[in-house]
Amino acid sequence: MSNIPGAPGAVDPATAPEPVGERKVSETLHFARRNPKLLIGSGIVLGLLLLGLIGPLFVTEGPNVYIGPQSQPPSSEYWMGTTSFGQDIWAQFVHGLRSTFITGALGGGIAFVVGTTVGFVAGYKGGLVDEILNMLTNVVLVLPALVVLIVAVAYLDVRGLVVQALFIGLTSWPWAARAVRSQALSLATRDYVDLARLSGRRTWRIITTEIAPNMSSYLVMSFILLFGGAVLIAAGLDFIGLGPTGGVSLGLMLESAVQWSALQLGMWWWFIPPGAAITLLVGSMYILNVGLDEVFNPKLREL
């Protein structure tokens, strides 16, 4: 067929059919823009992320500096009031929000990398490799993760965000590995994968170019769930006093509020903001995940 304009059989670019890949992307974007769960969830997450990134830039003093009168309710001078020691809760909140996102991203990212790597290799290779990796996954899966984290973190002399995220990631990956393995087992038997294998392409090349792209939507949703799980685990560790040494986080704010009887003293401005932020962040990520599932799954799309 000729591509010369005006020639017999020429294809008019304006009326030419849209490529399948581009049509699928445009269709996905169309449903994404119309999905309220996706819009609400992503809007809240982005709003909190921007607050955590930009908020500390407008705070003149550190989060743990004693700068004002003690136990002051929210006012024009102290937007979220002060603690029993005169610390600015607004400064603690924005710095704690940033720390929460860092821990969630690092912890969820480590769990995602380890889990998807184990799942892809086990599902693609099969046989003895699959049995060994599946046994390892089951061993880590049955371990009481929170107990292991408490024991491990409690014996560290210096605790930081990176160390905390590392331990969270190394104990949170098994369920992602099992889910990815089941998908990879199905895709590994497809004709295009067999053709790539016969052409002599390397294992990682086949996994990254043939199998993973067909699971992209599933992988995105898995990371979101791992992110939310890492935030909750970190908040739990912080609440029992195993958070970053000398740092600040939303969980540590709750721990301090409980330790110094903020509830009994009626200092609601000390414990409500961090608790609400954790609930809002994790809840919005769940809503975002449900919206993505409706967008990517044709059976769940709301027309």
Image: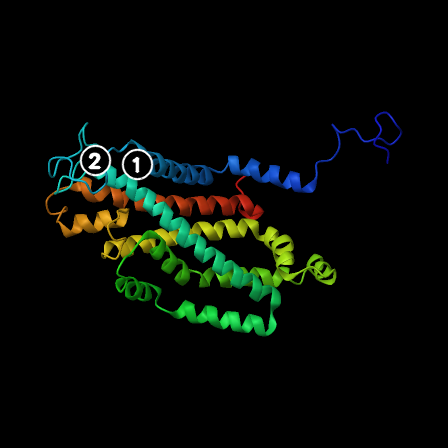
Q: Does residue 226 appear in the picture of this structure?
A: no
Q: Residue at x 52, y 38 (%)?
A: 32
Residue 245 place in picture, x, y as percent? 25, 53
According to the image, label 1 marks what residue?
A: 56
Residue 8 place in picture, x, y as percent? 89, 29
* Amino acid type for the residue under numbered disc 2: Met
Check the image and report above or below for 94 versus 176: above
Location of the C terminus by quadrant is top right
**Number of marks in picture:** 2
Mark with earlier residue (2, 1): 1
Q: Residue at x 38, y 39 (%)?
A: 49
Q: Residue placed farthest to the front in the image?
A: 157
* Side of 23 where 97 appears, left or right: left
* Side of 29 where 99 appears, left or right: left
Neighbour tally class for label 2: few under 14, some 14-19, many 20 plus, Cα within 10 Å: many
* Amino acid type for the residue under numbered disc 1: Pro
Location of the N terminus by quadrant is top right
Q: Residue at x 45, y 53 (%)?
A: 109
In this orientation, which residue lies closer to the viewer: 50 or 35?
A: 50
Q: For mark 2, give the secondary structure.
A: loop
Check the image and report above or below for 10 versus 220: above
Q: Does residue 117 appear in the picture of this structure?
A: yes
Q: Nearer the viewer, mark 2 or mark 1?
A: 1
* Side of 172 where 127 appears, left or right: right
Tell me whether circle 2 and circle 1 mark residues in contact (CB < 8 Å): no
According to the image, label 2 marks what residue?
A: 80
Q: Residue at x 53, y 52 (%)?
A: 218
Residue 5 place in picture, x, y as percent? 83, 26
Q: For mark 1, give the secondary structure.
A: helix
